[in-house]
Amino acid sequence: MVQTLTPMEQDRTLISLFCALFITVASVAFFFVFGLSDMIGDSGRSFQTSALPMVIVGVFRYACAYLAFHTIVFWMIRSPEPGRMFVVLHETGKEAMIRTEGFERIGTFSSWTLMVSGLAFFMAGTATWMAVFNLNVPPMLNTLTVVLMPVAYGAAFITATVVRYVIIPDEIAQKRPFGTYFKNYELVMHNFTPIFLAVDLFLVQAQLEWEFGLFPIYFGIIYVLFSYAYARLPRGYYIYSFLDPRINMAPVYLLVLLFACCLFYLGLWGMSMLLQWNAVLGGLALAFWVSRIVLFRRQVKDNPYAFQSSS
């Protein structure tokens, strides 16, 4: 559902920015009150333990990181085929379809999720290889792993869920060609990323804490502020209509997005607890969850738009 600013609505930008500022201050206070710095140190080492040889874990993590970076650079930024997005123009508040090329293609939340997931796998993989060769892992590397992995968990699982249950059904309802959602780079962003994160969680069974749900909130705040600033550029636009800070429900949508990022991480934290209690049961539950949010093809009976390209 597209949310656009109507002439009769009052501009809610200041209220939206105040909400973002309040959440930022509150989350920073939460970090220090609950002593997350000590939790990060305790959790960092658990990302380098597994029932499998750590060499296998290291290869897996580097392979996941490479796929993420390859997708961003070669299948998106440097791809000669432009992407397609329906956006809301900042100046007019109207919806428009645009063709995106180059770096413009990595402004979506899905792209940010892929980038942070690739970075998380790279950091965790580097620490893994250092442990394999009996090298001292720098505390900063462990810290980055502990911070980035929860961000990737929350962002990847909410992205896959929204794409499957909101975006694609909306494209079908509006009779838009949605074949683009099954191209290679889309499949990596929306399907393979949560799958790989789930596999890593199962193999390593790192010590997660519910308080780490704060990190996906940080990520959400940064993305929302980026969206606000990006739309203010010449010929700027809002990639997601609900992130237009001027509409009436903008503060509510902001809170819902940040809460959802945290909530999906908490779901993965719950899965980690189940894995530690019973690896088989936890693995089956995690596999079932992933199977319900990924989508590799969509059969739509008597829909002439099914599997059409975006051209």
Image: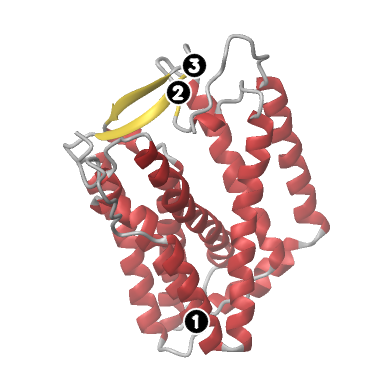
- Label 2, on which residue? 88
Q: Identify the amino acid type marked 2.
A: Val
C-alpha distance separating marks 3 and 1: 46 Å
Q: What element carries label 2?
A: strand
Q: Where is residue 207 in the image (x, y as percent from the top left)?
A: 62, 76
Q: Residue at the location (35% across, 62% down)?
A: 192
User: Of the numbered discs in the image, which one, if any, rests on residue 51?
Assistant: none
Q: Residue at the location (57% across, 82% down)?
A: 275
| Label 2, residues with CA under 10 Å away: few <14, some 14-19, many ≥20 | many
Q: Is mark 1 on a helix, strand or loop?
A: helix
Up the image or down, 139 lies above or below 117; here it is: below
Instruction: Find out whether the residues at labels 2 and 3 contact each other: C-beta distance under 8 Å.
Output: yes
Q: Residue at the location (61% across, 66% down)?
A: 267
Q: Is mark 3 on a helix, strand or loop?
A: loop
* Of the image marks 1 and 2, the number of the one nearer the N terminus: 2
User: Of the numbered discs in the image, which one, if any, rests on residue 93?
Assistant: 3
C-alpha distance separating marks 1 and 2: 41 Å
Q: Identify the amino acid type marked 1.
A: Gly
* Of the image marks 3 and 1, the number of the one nearer the N terminus: 3
Toward which corner of the image does residue 14 lie, by quadrant? top right
Up the image or down, 152 lies above or below 135; here it is: above
- Label 1, on which residue? 283
| Label 3, residues with CA under 10 Å away: few <14, some 14-19, many ≥20 | many
Q: Position of residue 292 (x, y in %)?
A: 45, 65
Q: Where is residue 238 in the image (x, y as percent from the top left)?
A: 47, 27
In depth, the one of 236 and 34 nearer the eye is: 236
* Of the image marks 2 and 3, the number of the one nearer the N terminus: 2
